[in-house]
Amino acid sequence: MLIPEEKIAEILAASDIFDVVSEAVILKKSGRNFFGLCPFHSEKSPSFSVNPDKQIFHCFGCSAGGNVLSFVMKYHGISFPEAARMLARKYNIVIETQKMTLEQRKAVQARESLFRLNKNVMQAYTGFLNDHLKGDCARQYLERRGTSKQIIEQFQLGYAPDAWDAVVNLLKEEKVAKGVAVRSGLVLEKKQKNSFYDRFRNRLMFPIFDINMQVAGFGGRVMDDSMPKYMNSPETPVYSKSRILYGLHAAKQACRRQGQVFIVEGYFDFLSLYQHGIENSVASLGTALTREHVRILKGYATTMTLVFDSDEAGIKAAKRSIDIFVQEGIDTRILVLPGNNDPDSYVMAHGRDAFLALADTAKTVMQFLLHLAVDTHGMSVEGRIKILDEMKQHLARVQDYAVRSIYVRELAETLNIDEKAVLEKVKDAYQKQANRQARGPIIPGVEEASQSVLESDPREKQILSMMLHWPELIPVAVEKKVLPSFYSKPLKQLGCLIIDSGTDTQNIVGAVMARVETDEDRQLIASMAMEDYTGVQDPVQTFEILVNRVIKIKNKTDRVIVSELTKVKEGCDVDVMALLKLKQQQIQQLHGS
């Protein structure tokens, strides 16, 4: 353990899972639980559930589940100790770690060192910007672009001097270890080794904050025609381009209030929109939008508008991003700005109201793609055939049947083609995609399949689930000695943990969750604790029937197997296939009525 158990218990007791999850997922109350769109897989109908009474979450779609620590770990992609520290900071709990292994200490210290270093360098860049001599060119550049002093200060903009060793000297002064310096991506090693130079030089600097307001990385922009125009930090242990969106730390509350987010490409696009009061915006850091980006944004907005330049590069960027949004089932709009405008230039020239009015005319994904296809191929007979061939691939990715039907009708009317013919083309494309996906998984071996079936035995799970719902049933399970009759070793181990956790109705789920070691076990406990038993009128009677059935089948099959094995030892002619059939019957009995 990196953190004492009593501190983990204190963190879990102080944390409110609804409070934590609702920062990332829009939750609506339904009965005793809260539901929202799962941040861990694609879905249109909410199957992600949070139970504040039991302090657990569970997704009925992808089976993700656990307690508040499990959620923080999975959502932010961090380790258990880091999740505990994050929650401890949130709830003002002071923790002292126990002795770590060398590897554990290095991993934790590496991340903390990088965050600390990034913060210090950000402050240095800010200082260079405000320096009367060094930062004059950068300050003039920001003034020409109309960037307000408030925005500069709020987003901690800075300047990397036109020098090879500005940051190198800073790291030397602070005695930063060589390994930390290299991992940060702020400096690069020269060919002759043991000598370094700054990655960012003569650039306007944009600190990139993660959702927890920590400086994860940097972006730098030149102020002339030099190339590359933009340069970002490389991937580091604290900076992942596929998970961080520029400005989300400042925009998340506005996105949630509006239910909408504008997604732009560049730093200045975001800053200009934010400066003009359009605070529900984020930027993609100049990289392609990822599935992780979209799933993170699903926690803050139900409608997403992609805002792109009208040039060829902007159109290509829009097309690259579309498939992810379609597959994730998001209400997505595409706004292509007129003329040669980008969001920055448009809002600076025309203002907030004009931008929002234009945003109201944004096209749906299929309207945008159809418009592009018509512009590309024209409306001749040959052109319409090419349009249909192109559009069927996009329509086949739409998961919602009703939505797909509407788009098929619109396409048929636009192309003046029989709707049934269009539908057949789309069905064919959909089936081909499904077939490609179906060929993917490898069929497991017989032994693996058999073990998988045993480990997911519904009766054994139901026994444990009822023990979690009605801890007063635990003495019955102990008295009847049902756990030795379990075929699933993982379920048997979980059963022992449940029995050892006592019969406190309020705390048993949390107590068991705190003692398991793997995500799989936490997910399993969450799913069992979320079972609905509203139709069970007599839990004791139902429980005893289940227990007796499991014990009876185990005793019977054990006797038969022992008898057959005895015959083998005595040299009798026993058909090996009969033993395999016996095993099959055993599994069928466990899963049958």
Image (spheres, rainbow, N blue to C red):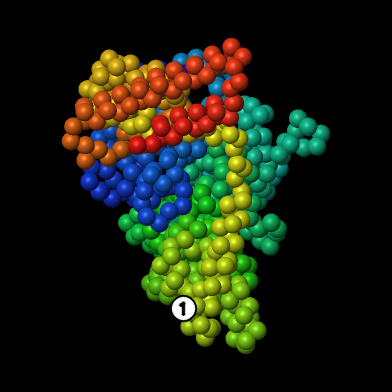
**Quarter of image, res 490:** top left
Residue type, label 1: Glu
Q: Residue at x 58, y 60 (%)?
A: 433
Residue placed under numbered mark 1 in the picture: 410
Question: Residue drawn at (43%, 73%), measured in percent from left and top?
Answer: 406
Q: Position of residue 260 (x, y in %)?
A: 39, 61
Q: Quadrant of residue 142?
A: bottom right
| Residue at the bottom extreme, as displayed | 380
Mark 1 surroundings: few (<14), some (14-19) or many (≥20) residues within 10 A: some
Residue 207: percent from the left, percent from the top? 53, 46
Label count reads 1
- The residue at the point 44 percent across, 34 percent down is 588
Residue nearest the observer in this picture, 394 or 142: 394
Q: Nearer the viewer, residue 143 or 152?
A: 152
Q: Secondary structure at mark 1?
A: helix
Q: Which residue is nearer to you in this view: 295 or 19?
A: 295
Q: Position of residue 333 (x, y in %)?
A: 46, 67
Q: Is residue 216 visible?
A: yes
Tell me: 218 left or right of 90: right
For the residue pair 92 and 460, the one nearer the viewer reads as 460
Quadrant showing the C terminus: top left
Furthest residue to the left?
537
Which residue: 58% across, 52% down?
438
In the rendered image, the vertical position of residue 35 relative to residue 374, given as above or below: above
Which residue is farthest front? Answer: 573
| Residue lying farthest to the right in this orientation | 192
Does residue 123 appear in this view? no
Question: Residue 382, position in %: x, y?
Answer: 65, 84
